[in-house]
Amino acid sequence: MFSHLLSAIKYLHRNGIVHLNIRPELILFQGESSSIDIKFLDFITARNLDEIGKIDENFEKLLQKIPSHYKSPELIS
């Protein structure tokens, strides 16, 4: 299952998308164990790879809504 999850993240990155808010309650697993489909929910904080360096005020407000126990250390400080 973990390899399916990493494959889904790799698919996003290959298509120029960074989710920025992957957490357990935002992952949907569908199918049987041999053919699992993984869907990520809530792309409100997602960004195109070309936009990663361009963090605006609205994005900062969105980051504040992410529960602190899911944030990386650099976002908490």
Image (cartoon, rainbow, N blue to C red):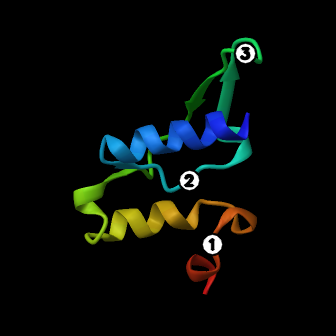
Quadrant location, the N terminus: top right
Task: Give the secondary structure at mark 2.
Answer: loop
In whole angstroms, how far apart are the C-alphas of marks 1 and 3?
A: 32 Å
The quarter of the displayed image where residue 25 is located: top right
In whole angstroms, how far apart are the C-alphas of marks 2 and 1?
A: 10 Å
Query: Label 1, on which residue?
Result: 72
Query: Label 3, on which residue?
Result: 34
State whether residue 69 is above or below residue 9.
below
63 displayed left or right of 13: right
Query: Label 2, on which residue?
Result: 21
State whether residue 47 is above or below residue 24.
below
Task: Give the secondary structure at mark 1.
Answer: loop
**Mark 3 touches mark 2? (CB < 8 Å):** no
The quarter of the displayed image where residue 5 is located: top right
Give whichever of discs 3 and 2 has the lower sequence position.
2
Q: Residue at x 59, y 43 (%)?
A: 6
Three-letter amino acid code of the residue under disc 2: Asn
Give whichever of discs 2 and 1 has the lower sequence position.
2
Q: Residue at x 47, y 44 (%)?
A: 10
